[in-house]
Image (tube, rainbow, N blue to C red):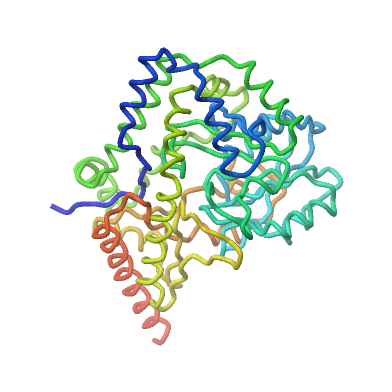
Amino acid sequence: MLTAISRYGARVLPNTEELVAGCKARGEFVEGPQIAEFEAAFARRLGVDPSCAVTAAYGRMAFYYILKALDLPAGSEIIFPALTFWVVPELARVAGLTVVFADVDPKTFTVKPDSVERLITDKTRAIIPTHLYGLPCDMDRLLEIAARHNLIVLEDCAHALGALYKGKPVGTFGTGALFSFQTLKPLNCYGGGLALVTDRQLARKVRQQIEALPWPSEKRVQDRLLMGRLQRIFIKPWVFSISLFPVLWISALIDANPDVFLWENIRSLNPLPGQYTERFPNVQAVIGLEALKHFDGWTAQAQANAQYVNHVLGDVPGIQVPYVPPGCTHVYYQYCVYGPEGPKRDDLVVRCVRRGIDIETLHVDVPPDMELFGSVKAEADGARRSAQALQIPVYCGLRRDQLERVATTVRAVLAQAAAASGGAARS
C-alpha cells in the first residue's frame, strides 16, 4: 500500500500527556502561575521586557487587543499585505478600522514597500508587515516609510517565530506584534497567541483588556487538547494513508477541493465569537514553556530539510526555490516553489498527490478577491501570482527517508512538467 506523507506536521512534545496530567493534579489546569512564567520566557527569548508579552486566546485576538489599546480614530486606514490570512484584516474591521491591501513581491511573498507607500493617505495610521511563511519582510524600508509618514508598525509573526532580520528577531521592530500558537505553528501550544508590545504603557492597556475576560471552561480546554491530539494522530503517515489521504486522492481525480473543510468559514466576525473573548489557560502555557526548550532544534531541522530540498530541486529548469534576501533568516513554516510556466498549478498538485505526496496549493488568502472585503482599496497582482506557488512539506518531523521521497517525487513531477513545457514552446 502507498504510504502517503501529509503536507502538515505538528511539533509535538513526547511528554505532553504528562504535562497535562500534572496541571490537573495541581489544580492548575485553567488558572495557574505558568502563564506569567511563559510570558516572561517568551519575552526573554526576543530580548524584551517580560511585562511587554501578554498571552491571548488567539494570535488574531492579540492583534485585536493591540488595536483597541492604540485607540485609533474610527475609520483609520491600516495597510495589510494582499496575501495574508483573512481573519487578521477582518478583526481590524471589527475594531472599527478601514483595511487597505498593498501588493506583495512574488519572489519573497512579503509586502512590497513601494506598494505600501503608494497607498498611504491622510487617513493611514498603521502598516502590518506579515512575515509570511517564516521569511522576514524588508523592515528597513518599511520602518523608513513609517517614520516619514508618522505611522505605527504592527508585525504579524504568526508564521515566523525564530526568524531574524539583520540579526534581530521579528516582532521587535515596531510598536507591537502578534504571535500564534495554533497546533501547526512554529510553537505549538494547541491554540492561543501572544501580543508583544514594546511600550510598557501600551502593554498595560492590552493586559487590562485581557485580564477583564473570563477564563475558558475546563471542558473547552480539554476539547482543544483533544482536537490537537487527533490532528497529530491523523497526520502520522500510516494513519494519514488510510484516512484523510484517500479523500485527497479521490478529490484529485474529480477536481474537488476538500481544503474548504480544513479551515475556518470565511464570514464576518462581528460580533466576536464567544471562544475568541476568553483568556489563555495555564495548561497551554505549561506546554509552551516546555516547547521553548526544544524550539531551536526544531527550527534548525526544518531549515536543514529546506536546504536539502533546495539542493534536489535547484537545478531543475524553470523551477524557483524559495528566495532568502541577504540579512534574513527563513524558518520555513511553509516552503514554496514555483513550477515551470505552462502547466497549471493544480495539475502539478494532482500529480504529486497521486504519488503519495500531499502538496499544499495556497496556505493563506488573497483577501482583496474575497466577497467579504467588497471593493476595498488594493494592489494585488503580485499576490495573485504568489497564489500559484506550490507548498512542499519540509517540517522538522519528517524522517530522512520521507524527506528524500518528498524531494525526489516533486523533482520528478516538476522536471517532467518543465520538459513538456519546453517541448510545447519549441513546437
x and y percentages locating residue 180 in the rendered image: 52, 38
Tell me which residue sits at (29%, 71%) in the image. Answer: 412
Quadrant that contains the C terminus: bottom left
In the image: residue 99, left or right of residue 302: right
Image label count: 0
* Residue with the most extreme left position: 1
Tell me which residue sits at (63%, 60%) in the image. Answer: 166
Q: Name the foreground residue: 337 vs 27.
A: 27
Q: Name the foreground residue: 133 vs 37.
A: 37
x and y percentages locating residue 69 in the rendered image: 74, 29
Relative to 183, say whether 17 is above or below. above
Relative to 69, say whether 8 is above or below. below
Tell me which residue sits at (37%, 26%) in the image. Answer: 225
Quadrant assignment, res 206 = top right
In the image: residue 372, left or right of residue 251: right
x and y percentages locating residue 176 in the rendered image: 69, 40
Relative to 342, say whether 13 is above or below. above
x and y percentages locating residue 366 in the rendered image: 57, 50
In the image: residue 115, left or right of residue 322: right
* Residue with the most extreme bottom position: 426
Quadrant assignment, res 17 = top left
